[in-house]
Image (cartoon, helix red, strand yellow):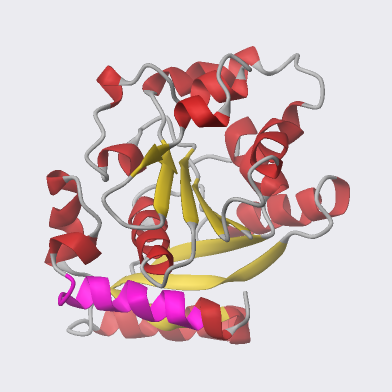
Amino acid sequence: MIISIANQKGGVGKTTTAVNLAASLAISERKTLIVDIDPQCNATTSFGITYSGLYAHLYHMLIGNKDAREVIRKTEVPYLDIVPTHPDLIGAEVELLDAENREFILKNILGRLENTYKYTIIDCPPSLGLLTINALVASDFVIIPLQCEYFALEGLAMLLRTITVIKRRLNPKLETMGVLLTMFDKRTNLSFRVMDEVKGYFNDSVFKTVIPRNVKLSEAPSYGKPALLYDICSKGAESYLELASEILEKGA
């Protein structure tokens, strides 16, 4: 199963969700792959991988210079592998513009790995360009992180339209698995107002799990670890374990 973590807004917790959800699924002994398709490389560095030293990464896979065996790396988390990326990936959108079936390049790559991994989590860039389109075309589901802050729903209509268009034209099986509320601060009325607004808009499409604003979640990437390895007892780590359980309970 392939799940994209997507929202064209930055700072909503996409990478935090991708990294920690992937780790949480992996420790339940489901073979999991995380794919960093964001040229900012934050998912890559969150696992302690320095992109400057990479000789093979996602960019090489997309342009056909390397195969998966040369690119995929193990992480410290058992059952979890990663396709790391490099800032060079930013050039891929331009280089692939004239490629045949350019929206299906990532789908074809991941299709060759479908018998290896139970779950593949894609960390999308904060845009709706060709890289994100490739991710959505390759995916079975999309999770939309929304921060519990002012303007949370701003720009969301564009993402929903993009998902609808891709489902109609390029990937009929694509479904929205749910909206994930992130950066929830129970000390503020604003977080509760945003929660009510999002639940009123999306109804049952909102995950029961809510990701809190948590210092350990923010600190973990600087140590090159997901929160589960940095501090498994933290509220942040516990919330992503709950999210993974919720996904597993759905039969996904």
Q: Is residue 249 magenta?
A: no
Query: Residue 159: where, in percent of width, then height?
Result: 62, 53
Q: Which residue is drawn at 48% across and 66% down?
A: 30
- Which quarter of the rendering shows the C terminus? bottom right
Foreground residue among 175 and 28: 28
Q: In this view, does 11 lie above or below 237?
A: above
Q: How many labels does the image show?
A: 0
Magenta-highlighted residues: 232-246
Q: Where is residue 148 in the image (x, y as percent from the top left)?
A: 35, 71
Q: Residue at x 32, y 40 (%)?
A: 42
> Does residue 250 appear left or right of residue 168 in this picture?
left
* Chief secondary structure of the magenta portion: helix
Give the left or right position of residue 179, taking residue 41 as reference.
right
Residue at 20% in and 78% down = 235
**Location of residue 215 in the rendering, given as x and y in whole percent from the top left corner:** 12, 65
| Image x and y of residue 172, in percent | 84, 56
Quadrant including the N terminus: bottom right
